[in-house]
Each structure stands twice: as C-alpha cells, then as structure tokens.
Amino acid sequence: MAKKFNEISVIIPIYKDEKRLKNNLPKIRKYLENNFKKFEIIIALDPPAGNTEKTAKNIFKNVKIVKNKRRMGKGYSIKEGMLKAVYSPVLFIDIDLSTPVEEIDILLPYLKKNHVIIGSRNMQESKIKERQPFLRSALGNIYPYLVRLLVIKDIRDTQCGFKLFRKDILKPVFSLQRIGGFAFDSEILLIAKKRGYKIKEVPVEWSNSKDSRLNIVKDSLRMAVDVIKIFTNTKRGFYDGN
Ligand SMILES: Nc1nc2c(ncn2[C@@H]2O[C@H](COP(=O)(O)OP(=O)(O)O)[C@@H](O)[C@H]2O)c(=O)[nH]1
Ligand SMILES: [Mg+2]
C-alpha cells in the first residue's frame, strides 16, 4: 500500500440526513483508515437528529458528535466542529459525497504552500458528472455574481462542500465567522484572505445529489441577504481581527 499520511480531522455537517449518512459514512471511514495513521470524524449535527447519532456510532464507534439544540445552519455547525478539531489539516465534506472523499488526495499536496485548499466545480479541469437541476443552477448563477460583486472577486466556486484548512488558521478565521447559513463559505474565504492566508482553488470531481436540504426560494433569499451582511460587516471592520 502507498505511504499513509499522518493525520486529518474531517467535519461532516448533518441535517435530516440519516439515510445518506448510513450509505456514505462507511466510505469515508474506510478511506480514512486506509490513508491516514490518525484521524477523527466530527459530525456537526442539527436537530431533528432522529437516530442519526446511533447510526453514526454503529458505523464508527469513535465518531465525535457536536450537536445543536435547535437548527443553527450548516455554517454555524461547521464552525463548531472546526473549533473542536484536533488534527491538521481539517476537511469539511458534505455527506452526499457529491465530491468523493478520495479527492482529498488531490487537495493535500497544495498544503505545503497554501493555508486553505478548496474544491472547485467551475474550473476547466473540474469533472462534473451530473449537473444541478435548471432552477437551482439558474439561481446558483445569481449568488456567485453577488459574491464576486460584494465579497470576493478571484474565486470561481466559493460553495463546493469540500474544503481543506491548515489547523493553525482555524481559530483566527472561524472565530470571526458570523454567518450561520449556507453563505458561510464566502465569508470564511473573505476572512482568510483578509488575514493574509493563501487560498488555492483546485478542480474536483462533483456530481449532483437529487436529495437536497436547501429550500430553493427561502435559502436563496437568505443567502442573498447574507452576502449583503458580509459586505456591510466588512465595511464595519468586523473581519479585521485584533
Ligand atoms: N448541521 C447542518 N447541516 C446541514 C444543514 N443543511 C444542510 N446540511 C448538511 O450540509 C450538507 C449539504 O447539504 P445538501 O442538502 O446536500 O445541500 P446541497 O448540496 O447544496 O443541495 C449535507 O451534509 C447536509 O446534511 C443545516 O442546516 N445544518
Ligand atoms: Mg448536496
């Protein structure tokens, strides 16, 4: 077998997603066992949890679970998980495995020269196996437009659910995070950039999962409002740190 990497922490946000967790957590566990000497899996769980905790522990008994009392959002949950991670680097990954866990191999080499490595669906070499449905991708075009206009210009895909961070930058970056919903990725990338950390965007494989927690109308509106919030937060100096 190829040489194992030393360590990694993996954060998985979960909301009403027990079925996909049951299908896909075994794949994540297996990949990590085969490729890392030490690893941890942190599930960042929003209620209703149902049997999610039990299901996760049956698949991997050492799984760590960070649980909210009420639904706080993907961004809030990931922040909680990130601030508890013990290994470096730290990856967050969507449980639908739209980007397969094996793509970690593609991101890891860039860690030597960068602090944040993000999976991208919008580069020439990205392998998009199945696209998002029409309405989602049409609305999905407005969001990146707003992001480019108001938040961060030089990143082609801020939203892919597959991002890798060096642990030493988690506290300075995630402690300034204010967005709890789906727009948090754009905010995190802006904070990282403002703090002088290097971000590398890398093409990855991606395929649409029909099942989605995102409410196209409600969440798209919320995301647009949040982009404006990020913009005003920037003007007010909220991301400048100490
Ligand atoms: N903790 C938490 N996780 C969420 C929330 N919404 C979505 N997720 C998780 O975030 C990941 C991406 O969600 P998904 O429904 O696939 O979104 P999409 O790919 O943008 O359609 C999955 O692992 C979900 O379980 C939320 O409100 N809270
Ligand atoms: Mg998805």
Image (cartoon, grey):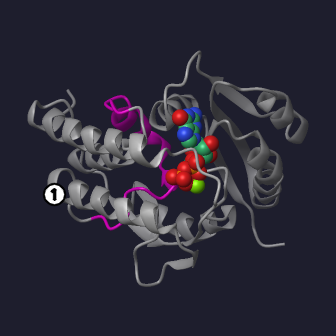
Above or below: residue 79 compared with residue 190: above
Residue lying at 45% horizontally and 49% vertically, measured from the top left: 216
Would residue 201 be seen by someone viewing this image from the given angle? yes
Above or below: residue 215 compared with residue 113: above
Magenta span:
155-179
Position of residue 143 in the picture relative to residue 149 (left or right): right
Spot occupied by residue 64 in the image (x, y as percentages of width and height): 72, 30
Say if the magenta span includes residue 21.
Answer: no
Would residue 89 be seen by someone viewing this image from the given angle? no
* Residue 184, image quadrant: top left
Spot occupied by residue 63 in the image (x, y as percentages of width and height): 77, 34
Position of residue 162 in the picture relative to residue 200 (left or right): right
Q: Nearer the viewer, residue 42 or 50?
A: 50
- For disc 1, the marked residue is 149
Residue lying at 52% horizontally and 67% vertically, measured from the top left: 132
Spot occupied by residue 125 in the image (x, y as percentages of width and height): 47, 83
